[in-house]
Amino acid sequence: MSEFKQLVFSGVQPTGNLHLGNYLGALQKFVALQDTYECIYCVVDMHSLTATLVHDDLVEQTRGIAAAYLACGLDPKKNIIFNQARVPQHAELAWIFNCVARIGWMNRMTQFKDKAGKDRENASLGLLAYPSLMAADILLYRATHVPVGEDQKQHLELTRDIAQKFNNDFSEKIANLGYGVEMMVGEEQVNGFFPLTEPLIEGPAPRVMSLRDGSKKMSKSDPSDLSRINLLDDADTIARKIKKAKTDPAPLPGDVEGLAGRPEADNLVGIYAALAGVSRENVIEEFGGRQFSEFKPALADLAVEKLAPIGEEMRRLKADPAYIDSVLRDGGERASVKAEATMKQVHEIVGLLAN
Ligand code: AQP
């Protein structure tokens, strides 16, 4: 039985400064996976157009995300690192997926509801179809695993729905052409062209919350800069933001269960655990019963130790755009070879006369 080759794909959109949530939810995992998987990491610049159409500095932002990838420790030789716009097959496959996916599926996406707000009729078609382009990003490489933060879980489920519907709708063509691959779906063995991709969300901080409000996700678009730690913040700023982070008056609990109903404390413990590479239980073993006045300085020291060198390296790399462009160009060429091979088969399956 042939099986899908294990392959990791993920991306980050260039829509502002990267923060600790992006780092713990995505970048830190990208780095850990490069030793065990073949990995493709994309700067998804075309997705940025769904947030704002006209950007002053999209090129700079795109280079900035690539700089963050490299500064965190991704090896551009071992992995494919590129920006989406260099490989037009992303948009082409997204069009086919627009015809596979249903409007109802897109309307149910919480990210669309949040970002479109009350005036949905006035949201761009691109914002509605965002998950279709994301599915294309992943499935163009027939990726089996996608490291993401918890906020992207629903989009990953939709990616599976799109893959499954494509596999079902074209099952005869896929079988006749001999392009099917066997895979297990639950207990059942099925044959399909696209894998049902697994999200990799686990870890002690799958959803990093705002430092000012433990009920809100840490986000680039939060108007308060104190709500997040940016990867480009210097050591003093990181320490100041942690000192000012909202907490409750009680000391840290004696066990992890005691964090329930204490979102700010829960968030800071999760951040510590993820940065230190330990479990939340380990953090509570060390700091249980201690006041925030003791825990926060320890967290600040750890955050500075882990993040300040990344920020410094990002600044150094950003000063050398020619090098970043050469990495993205090389990655784009390697990604294109894989993208073209997939699309050649997709054209045949769908019946598009393009080969
Ligand atoms: N708070 C978070 N906790 C954990 N993971 C997070 N991610 C984002 N925020 C958190 C993960 O970062 C990766 C890149 O996400 P993106 O490019 O889609 O950026 P985003 O989700 O648009 O980032 P923001 O800050 O949330 O932007 P706005 O403010 O525009 O909504 C993904 O893997 C994501 O899960």
Image (spheres, rainbow, N blue to C red):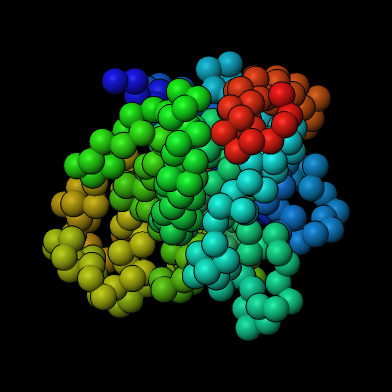
Instruction: Residue 338 in the image: state x and y as whole percent.
Output: 60, 23
Is 325 drawn above or below residue 104 in the view shown? above
Determine whether 28 is above or below 115 in the image: above
User: In the rendering, at what x and y percent does residue 35 appear?
Assistant: 40, 21
Residue closer to the observer: 230 or 94: 94
Residue shown at 47%/32% (left/top)?
Answer: 174
Q: Residue furthest bottom?
A: 118
Residue that appears at 39% across and 41% down = 196
Closer to the camera in the image, 156 or 219: 156
Give the image quadrant in which the ligand numbered 1 is located. bottom right
Up-down: is 346 above or below 323? below
Q: Is residue 257 left or right of residue 275?
A: left
Locate residue 348, reporting x and y percent: 61, 30
Depth order, front residue of 177/187:
177
Say which residue appears at 81% left-offset and 25% top-offset: 322
- Residue 55: which quarter of the image? bottom right
Q: Identify which residue, 79 or 231, lies in the foreground.
A: 79
Q: Position of residue 166 (x, y in %)?
A: 49, 45
Say which quadrant the C terminus sits in.
Answer: top right
Please give left or right for residue 21 compared with residue 259 in the image.
right
Who's the residue at 36% across and 62% down the image?
267
Decide if residue 323 is in sight here.
Answer: no
The N terminus lies in which quarter of the figure? top left
Left or right of 111 in this view: 16: right
- In the displayed orientation, state which residue is furthest to the top: 77
